[in-house]
Amino acid sequence: MLETLRLQRLHVGPIDLQAGAGTCVAIEGRSGSGKSVLLRMIADLDPHAGDAALDGEPCSRMPAPRWRQRVTYVAAATGWWYDTVAPHFEDGERLRALLPRVGLPAEAAGWEVARLSTGERQRIALLRALTPTHRVLLLDEPTSGLDAESTAQVEALLHDELARGTIIVMVTHDPGQAGRLAHQRYLLADGRLHENML
């Protein structure tokens, strides 16, 4: 169970949210409403009031690296530290096996990051988050740069993650995607979450 406990930063909050294993929560709302701020608070990447907890263990009582191994944030604009793809992954064989799941050839493990399109970077960054220790995925517009076929492949991968018990909190501007993936849907407006039944 992932819980947020009166999380608050800037114009967002306080936010109380609960999501059980295998649950996808979709957060929708206008640009600038604070959706990314909320994900970054859950990931403990920015200073904030309140707390988050995973299976009753508060983030505030856990070393930051340990929390982020379990609660993994995938930003809309991804960061890269090496010139090629493979060094960003601990297990190159697993990477090559996963790449076709998101419509990329296994050889993409050897590609230079500079040659990747925005959509390719999005898909590879998602794969980078799928570590043996992850329990929660915080996804900021995970398919915004993708065509319909690639979006369907990513959504299939996310369905598999949910079936394994992963908790997903996803920001999306696509109501169709929220409808296909989410068990809980919220609209973030005026700094608060409102149940979105659309």
Image (cartoon, helix red, strand yellow):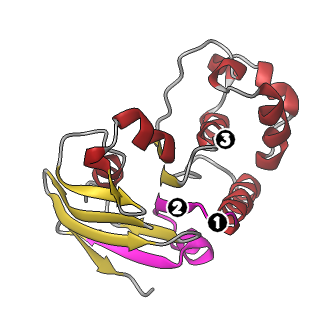
Q: Amino acid at mark 2?
A: Ile
Residue 64 magenta-drawn?
A: no
Residue 175 magenta-drawn?
A: yes
Which badge, 3 or 1, comes first in the chain's sequence?
3
- In the picture, measured across the screen, residue 61 lies left or right of residue 88, that is left
Q: Amino acid at mark 1?
A: Leu
Q: Which mark is residue 168?
A: 2
**Between residues 41 and 177, which one lies in front from this camera angle?**
41
How far apart in space, not on screen, are marks 3 and 1 (Cα)? 15 Å
Residue 22 shows in this picture: yes
What is the residue that sits farthest to the bottom in this orientation? 197
Per the image, the residue denoted by label 3 is 127
Q: Residues within 10 Å of mark 2 (few under 14, many from 20)?
A: many
Per the image, the residue denoted by label 1 is 162
Residue 140 shows in this picture: no
Q: Residues within 10 Å of mark 1 (few under 14, many from 20)?
A: some
Whether label 1 touches label 2, CB < 8 Å: yes
Of the two numbered discs 3 and 1 in the rendering, the one whose residue sits closer to the viewer: 1
Magenta segment: 164-188
Residue at x-position 25% and y-position 47%: 60
**Between residues 63 and 95, which one lies in front from this camera angle?**
63
- In the picture, measured across the screen, residue 124 lies left or right of residue 171, that is right
How far apart in space, not on screen, are marks 1 and 2 (Cα)? 7 Å
How far apart in space, not on screen, are marks 3 and 2 (Cα)? 14 Å
On screen, residue 56 above or below 60: below
